[in-house]
Image (cartoon, rainbow, N blue to C red):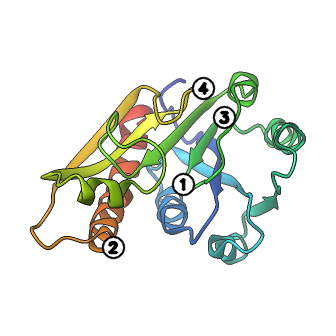
Amino acid sequence: MAKLNGSKKIKTAVFISGRGSNLINLIKFSLKKNSPIRIELIISDNSKAKGLIYSKRYNIKKKIYLFKKRNIAENKILDKLRNKKIKLICLAGFMKILSKNFIKKFRGKILNIHPSLLPKYKGLNTHERVIKNNEKFSGCTVHFVNSKLDSGKIILQKKIKINKNETANTLAKKVLRQEHILYLKALKKLYC
């Protein structure tokens, strides 16, 4: 994808499943003059996702697709993305795995933020597994999405030290703070 030229921002969709802390962070970033993205669409697989409140607050279109039949949901999403001319998807706590077919058919880039130092600790319950294995460090990774879970090309990582009495909960909070910084850095690195 080309770097940003002039005032043309990249039309972006953010996919969420939960509270939307990375979403609100991305929205605030997108509103800055020098931001390379403009968020046109929020997509969720969860009608009760707390992050959906930001669509109303910031006047961004939202769509909810329940993944009862993944291929039907994905085809509807692809139609919507084409319709809105979306060129970038930012996954932000989206808890569904996108199919190979979806990734291939979407004619743009898909980014994800993952709460571990990939390739270690792919998938779910990363903080619990990190603590259980007595790791000294953890962190977060922004990467391109490919057809293998949490295996796409790494864009940026942030490493953080794990304290002696760290719990999965305290680690999750520490990592999340870093996610908010890292996602924006990755977008600037790619598109500014």
Does dot 2 land on a helix, a strand or a loop? Answer: helix
- Residue located 57% across and 48% down the image: 91
Visible residue check, residue 58: no
Comparing labels 2 and 3, the label whose residue is closer to the camera: 2
Residue that label 3 marks: 87
The answer to which quarter of the image holds residue 72 is top right
Comparing labels 2 and 1, the label whose residue is closer to the camera: 2
| Pointer 4 or 1: first along the chain | 1
Classify mark 4: residues with Cα within 10 Å, few (<14), some (14-19) or many (20+).
Answer: some
Residue that label 1 marks: 92
Q: Quadrant of the N terminus?
A: top right
Q: Quadrant of the C terminus?
A: top left
Distance of label 4 from label 2 (alpha carbons): 30 Å
Residue that label 4 marks: 147
- Residue located 64% across and 73% down the image: 54
Q: Amino acid at mark 3?
A: Lys
In the image: residue 131, left or right of residue 118:
left
| Pointer 4 or 2: first along the chain | 4
Residue lying at the far left of the rendered structure: 164
Distance of label 2 from label 1 (alpha carbons): 19 Å
